[in-house]
Amino acid sequence: MKAVILAAGRGERLSPLTDWIPKPLLKLDGKPLIGYVLEAFVEAGVDDFIIVTGHLGDHLRKGVEALHLEAEILFIHNPDYRLGNASSLLAARDALAGERHFLLSMSDHIIESHLVEAALKASGDDPLLCVDASPRYLRDVKEATKVLVDGEGYIRRIGKELRLWNGVDTGVFLLTSGIFDALPRGWVPPSLSHWMRRLIREDVLKACDVSGCFWLDVDTWDDLSWARKVLRDGEG
């Protein structure tokens, strides 16, 4: 199974550092953020990647190649990366031709292999999002993308603004080729959450409960400091 890693964003909240270093290459304990992501997938048995680049794309590619992973990696540049992460997933569409299922991850979410393994075990006919009902290392719940999961395991709402929720989006998905057909021709959703809401309206987006798995989202300077502390304390 292929895994799409979205690594195109500008990382503005970590500026000015990200003015000259791609956010996925920012290091924690000597390893770039995207290194944690790729290694988690490889440990889970996934070694075929599509990495979508944008901001400082050539720099990012060289940084990933320097990791010398035993994996097949296809780099795709998204010239429209400023339109948001949904545009980067759309940029990978042709490279996913013939794939019934594929994994999707952000490049700035530190994850462990058990989280990826849980998604693979839950694979079915419906697309799914890995959800944590009790995130241990979530620093700021207001900034998190939250979800409301019903009694049958389907996601009914998603967004940062939710007041009623019972899980948090971990940034890891197992999707089907059919998600591209859910979009009107020529329309680029402003975010992945907008795209997922279309699936929710069709009653097809399931939650994969990964509560207890380690993951961290790094968006801001405070997040970076928090992640460094957690990793150095040996909790990751």
Image: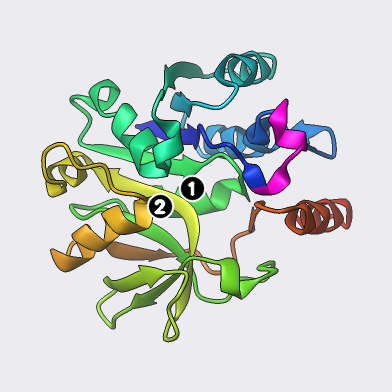
Q: Quadrant of residue 223?
A: bottom right
Q: Majority secondary structure of the magenta segment?
A: helix
Percent of width and height locating residue 84: 42, 42
Single out the residue that lies furthest toward the bottom. 164
Image quadrant in which you'd find residue 199: bottom left
Question: Which amino acid type corresponds to the residue marked 1 in the rendered image?
Answer: Val
Q: Residue at x 72, y 25 (%)?
A: 20
Vertically, is 233 above or below 176?
below
Quadrant location of the C terminus?
bottom right
**Residue drawn 62% across and 34% down?**
39
Q: Residues within 10 Å of mark 2 (few under 14, many from 20)?
A: many
| Crowdedness near tag 1: few (<14), some (14–19) or many (≥20) residues, C-alpha within 10 Å | many
The local secondary structure at tag 2 comes to helix
**Residue 78's x, y, as percent?**
41, 25
Quarter of the image that includes the N terminus: top left
- In the picture of the structure, the residue carrying the numbered disc 1 is 116
Under mark 2, the amino acid is Ala
Residue 26 percent coordinates (x, y): 74, 35
User: Height in image: 183 above or below 196?
Assistant: above
Q: Which residue is mark 2?
A: 119
Q: Residue at x 43, y 17 (%)?
A: 74
Which segment did they paint magenta?
A: 13-20
191 or 230: which is nearer to us?
191
The answer to whether the residues at label 2 and label 1 have Cβ atoms under 8 Å apart is yes
In the image, 53: left or right of 152?
A: right
- Residue 71 % position (x, y): 52, 19
User: Could you say which disc has been placed on residue 94 in the image?
Assistant: none
Q: Nearer the viewer, residue 236 or 76?
A: 76
Q: Residue at x 34, y 48 (%)?
A: 174
Residue 161 or residue 2, whichever sits in front: 161
Report if residue 185 lies within the magenta region. no
